[in-house]
Amino acid sequence: QVQLLESGGGLVQAGGSLRLSCAASGRTFSNYHMGWFRQAPGKEREFVAAISRFGGSSYSADSVEGRFTASRDNAKNTAYLQMNSLKPEDTAVYYCAAKYYSGRYNSPTGYNDWGQGTQVTVSS
């Protein structure tokens, strides 16, 4: 099991930026693909971005393409989500998640371990 702890959320004005961090412990971090999901009140959890074990491949949802970027530093056991040009509709609780097997990065069902989430609020 991988323990995950997100940080970096907060309140930001539309057009601003935030960088979320996800610190991992418990297992070899580089064995896991990392995903980012978000959940707004009354909505289902949705895929945001993902990055492969060694950072060679990354994926983004259409809604955040060109604005959000997933990255990782395996030496620091940490994954990141850089969020630029934030919009009010990006307001949600953001979760990082770890996945051992490749493929279907946009589906939450393949992720074994989840962080507790961090709130991101974008004001208009």
Image (cartoon, rainbow, N blue to C red):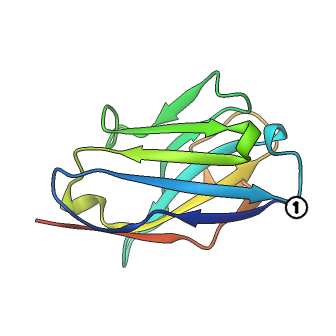
User: What is the residue that sits farthest to the left in this orientation?
Assistant: 124
Count of numbered badges drawn on the protein? 1
Q: Residue furthest front?
A: 76
Quadrant assignment for the C terminus: bottom left
- Please state the horizontal and vertical placement of residue 92, each as a whole percent of the image: 37, 68
Residue 54 against residue 4 in the figure, above or below: above
Q: Is residue 112 left or right of residue 71?
A: right
Q: Secondary structure at mark 1?
A: loop
Q: Position of residue 105 (x, y in %)?
A: 62, 40
Q: At x 34% / y 42%, what residue is drawn? A: 64
Percent x, y of residue 95: 55, 62
**What residue lies at 66% left-to-right and 38% top-to-bottom?**
73
Q: Quadrant of the N terminus?
A: bottom right
Q: Is residue 41 left or right of residue 45?
A: left
> Viewer-proximal residue, 118 or 107?
118
Residue type beneath disc 1: Gln
Residue at the spot of label 1: 1
Q: Badge 1: how crowded within 10 Å, few (<14), some, or many (20+)?
A: few
Q: Which corner quadrant of the image does residue 57 belong to?
A: top right
Q: Position of residue 13 (x, y in %)?
A: 17, 62
Q: Residue at x 24, y 60 (%)?
A: 89
- The residue that appears at 35% across and 37% down in the rendered structure is 62
Which residue is the extreme one toward the top? 56
Using residue 100 as the reference point, say whether residue 123 is left or right of it. left
